[in-house]
Amino acid sequence: MNSLIQRAFNFNAGPSALPLVVLEKAQNELIDFRGTGMSVMELSHRSAAYEEVHNQAISLLKEMLSIPADYEVLFLQGGASLQFSMIPMNFLKPEEKAGYVMTGVWSEKAFEEAKLFGNPYQVSCTKDNQYRHIPKIDELNFSPNDAYLHITSNNTIYGTQWKNFPDTGDVPLIADMSSDIFSKPFDVSRFSLIYAGAQKNLGPSGVTLAIIRKDMIEKASSSIPTMLKYSTYSKNNSLYNTPPTFGIYMIGEVLNWIKDLGGLSEMNRRNEEKANLIYDTIDQSNGFYFGHAEIESRSLMNITFRLKDEELEKKFLSEAKKEGFIGVNGHRSVGGCRASTYNAVPYESCKAFSDFMRQFQVLNG
């Protein structure tokens, strides 16, 4: 990449930072993909050249998450937002109940969609506490007869994250992992369905990953449109129609980057190191900065905080932007500040932001 290009300190919540080495490789292959004389975006999705890209991405996903053999890996479109309705459409009958753990805006949206198909109910809700914490696992009083239990593993707007996942026994556990999948190791076998938009840790926007147990697919409703059935994708290796080929290519390259760095354990170590730079700055500021999330529920992906007064906050955000820190405004629904420290955000960016925060406090405290 041109050495004169000044890369921004990208803390956008999504679409978010991509690894520079992946962007450089994609740039080099953009016009002539591996001797084909075509861009990967120009390849037929039925061609051998693309089929290799597609299957390699699936293989890496299975390898790096140790996905058991009785699961399917699917590439879909429509983002997590389509999954909010696709899940109850497939798995929630009109007479059935499903439990939803309410930890933020995205779980609220999923819950509202489920109302169109069956009888969802709130197993637990932390809204009264402004979504500052994740409920304790022993507080989840769901029924053994539920069609499924739905959770959101990381909450981008409020900066909270599940540290451990519930054991739901025979009740299928479904998780929206859009904003923290591939940030740390976890046991896929605890879940019946995991879904995630790619645009946080996996690649560009436009691809939605689903990891689904085969018995879930088998028991899904058959009386729904073809493109809204998980079975359509599983039977056709996610090639029933034209998939988002460039996005899937990028997912494969991002996964290779994670693998080369040492896998998910190393990624988790790096993410903890990066997040702690900023959390330590907040905690050591004597109230000049204060975090939104309770300490035991803090996210390693989205660090949310406020300053001691609104005018100072506006000045902080304005000066941060001038210094090249992009995307540090809080979500429009809650305001404040947010630094999203996804996998591809480098340590150097987090260190620079921490230094800026400390200097701002010295000059304005």
Image: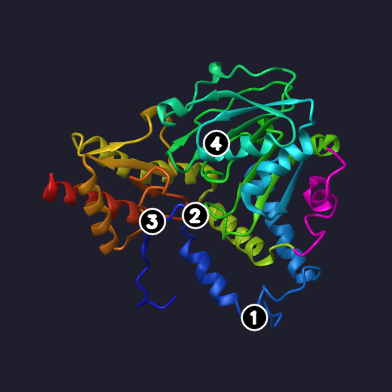
Label 3 packing within 10 angstroms: few (<14), some (14-19), many (20+): many
- Above or below residue 261? Residue 217 is above
Specify whether residue 11 is in view.
yes
Label 2 packing within 10 angstroms: few (<14), some (14-19), many (20+): some
Judging by the rendered image, the residue that carries numbered circle 3 is 327
- Dot placed on the residue nearer the N-terminal end, 2 or 1: 2
Judging by the rendered image, the residue that carries numbered circle 2 is 14
Q: What residue is shown at x 68% (from left), y 55% (from top)? A: 77
- Dot placed on the residue nearer the N-terminal end, 3 or 4: 4
- What amino acid is labelled 1 in the image? Asp
227 within the magenta span = yes
Judging by the rendered image, the residue that carries numbered circle 1 is 32
- Dot placed on the residue nearer the N-terminal end, 1 or 3: 1
Report x, y in % for residue 359: 17, 51
Query: Closest to the observer: 279 or 223?
Result: 223
The Cα atoms of the two marked residues, 1 and 4, are separated by 39 Å
Q: Dot 1 lies on which element?
A: loop
Judging by the rendered image, the residue that carries numbered circle 4 is 153
